[in-house]
Amino acid sequence: MPVFARAGVAFERGEGCWLISDKGERYLDFASGVAVNSLGHAHPHLVEALKRQAETLWHVSNLYTVPEAERLAGRLADASFADVVFFCNSGAEALEASIKLARKHFHAKGEPERYRLITFEGAFHGRTLATIAAGGQQKYLEGFGPKVEGFDQVPFGDLDALKAAIGPETAGVLVEPLQGEGGVRSLPPSTLRAIREICDAEGLLLVVDEVQTGVGRTGTLFAYEHSGIRPDVMAIAKGIGGGFPMGACLATREAADGMTAGVHGSTFGGNPLAMAVGNAVLDVVLAPGFLEHVRRMGLLLKQKLAGVADGHSDVVAEVRGEGLLTGLRCKVPNTEVVAALRDAKLLTVGAGDNVVRLIPPLIVTEAELDEAMERLDRGLSAVEAKLPASARSAAE
Ligand SMILES: *Cc1c(COP(=O)(O)O)cnc(C)c1O
């Protein structure tokens, strides 16, 4: 179905931060399959883990114990606030599980009237019926019938509006610590701390959507760590599979107290193939020095982007981001910039707020950042060359 506006290019293989097209052209991949290829392409440790698992066991369902899933859940819990984990196959499913968990928590407490979640404008939580309602974006809701009940949206980061939206039916707050699709907009750590305090004072669950920010993307294993808080529930997906489809809902034991046998499920969730890859991703991301590398590359990328942006102030309005989730807010349509950068053999992704995201694999090197900046410079110059003379700055 033509639901994607795909570019005409096709890739045959990948190596690290590089993708090679069917015409043999080498592209520097700063899209990472939309923040999915956390360890780049064909990472030897992931290839080996998947091959080994493929020769052993593919699928048994959740009728039986899956040791690799137990192990991955234990490692995720040890490395986070969580006690328990539910595995699924995508970000939207991880959010669905989180939303159901929050509602069931209050139901189990004898407060079934508390089922509503407060979300933020610009949010993106997936494309299922409940997650488009949670995201609240009209362009995704249009034409799909009545919006799923139970979501109240407030302006991004507006604490007064958040407090005002809390009522007797409120179960919790659902928030991305840094909005990815929404335009690489970060919530200041102080705001996330304030939301935590409000949730504590009102007895609400704090649900964080770290589908895009999780698993090292912002320089810490999870982005909530930057603010020093602990959420009650968290959805992850994208980066944890390194390209193998998987997602997970993590929660404290208390928050998940309504999630008893039979209330939720997934046929494929926790599949041995996905679990083998998830464990292999964690082997690398949790190895000593890895997250430090991400932080160092993140700082360098932001400095270098600021330098390139300075030279192209007709096109770039602002550099944004945290760690290796960065964005350029543009003065011309971001689709044109993404296309021009692709012509310069640099892959990027558009986002809301007219932003172009640069989200390289976490294994990116400084030499690759420099190469990306050269291609960015070339691509932005090509965009400028097409601008009418009147739109170019006097400084030129
Ligand atoms: C991508 C994304 C989702 C949805 O994930 P899918 O795997 O596409 O269902 C949800 N939340 C955030 C923050 C995302 O970036």
Image: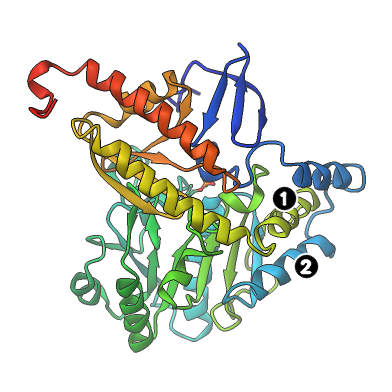
Q: Nearer the viewer, residue 87 or 12?
A: 12
* Residue found at x 35% / y 42%: 305
Q: Position of residue 51 (x, y in %)?
A: 85, 41
Residue 246 visible in image: no
> Residue 268, labelled with which disc?
1
Q: Residues within 10 Å of mark 1 (few under 14, many from 20)?
A: some
Nearer to us: label 2 or label 1 = 2
Q: Callout 1, which amino acid?
A: Phe
* Residue found at x 30% / y 51%: 122
| Residue furthest bottom in the image | 201
Q: Quadrant of residue 194?
A: bottom left
How many marks the image carries: the answer is 2
Residue 370, above or below 72: above
Q: Residues within 10 Å of mark 2 (few under 14, many from 20)?
A: few
> Left of 346 or right of it: where is 385?
left
* Residue found at x 44% / y 78%: 229
> Residue 70, labelled with which disc?
2
Q: Callout 2, which amino acid?
A: Glu
